[in-house]
Amino acid sequence: MAGSSHGHTPAAWTGVTIAIIGFTVAGAFMVMAEPLGFWAGMAIVALSPVVGLAMRAAGLGQPKAAAQPVHQATATATATREPAGAEG
């Protein structure tokens, strides 16, 4: 994944950070037995993909052209090789 720059954008980092904050808030209020706070945390979690997609639409995400996997370029090079012969 590191070779394809998967998730290395401000939109991805912001979306994940908001989701982590939401899960932390929901978890804390769940331990304190406060249902309203728990659902507020879950609302924060539900907000994270909306913010991520909005940032992606604003140009802060990964461009479509660079989204192809890295392994496609090497797959054609290995497909043209001849198999090794067994000598005996």
Image (tube, helix red, strand yellow):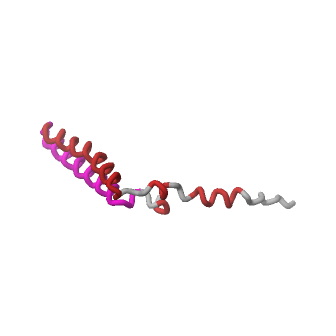
Q: Most prominent secondary structure in the magenta stretch?
A: helix
Q: In which quarter of the image is the C terminus?
A: bottom right
Image quadrant assignment for residue 72: bottom right
Residues 39 and 6: in front is 6
Q: Where is residue 15 in the image (x, y as percent from the top left)?
A: 30, 52
Residues 84 and 49: in front is 49
Q: Which residue lies most toward the right here?
A: 88
The residue lying at 30 percent from left, 50 percent from top is 54
Q: How many labels does the image show?
A: 0
The residue lying at 49 percent from left, 56 percent from top is 65
Up-down: is 45 above or below 69?
above
Q: Which residue lies most toward the front here?
A: 58
The residue lying at 37 percent from left, 56 percent from top is 61
Question: Is residue 30 part of the magenta span, yes or no?
Answer: yes
Residues 6 and 27: in front is 6
74 lies left or right of 36? right
81 lies left or right of 59? right
Magenta stretch in the rendered image: 7-35
Question: Is residue 36 part of the magenta span, yes or no?
Answer: no
Q: Which residue lies most toward the bottom here?
A: 3
Up-down: is 48 above or below 6?
above
Q: Position of residue 21 (x, y in %)?
A: 23, 52
Residues 68 and 16: in front is 68
Q: Position of residue 55 (x, y in %)?
A: 31, 54
2 lies left or right of 26? right
The residue lying at 54 percent from left, 59 percent from top is 70
Image quadrant assignment for residue 36: top left
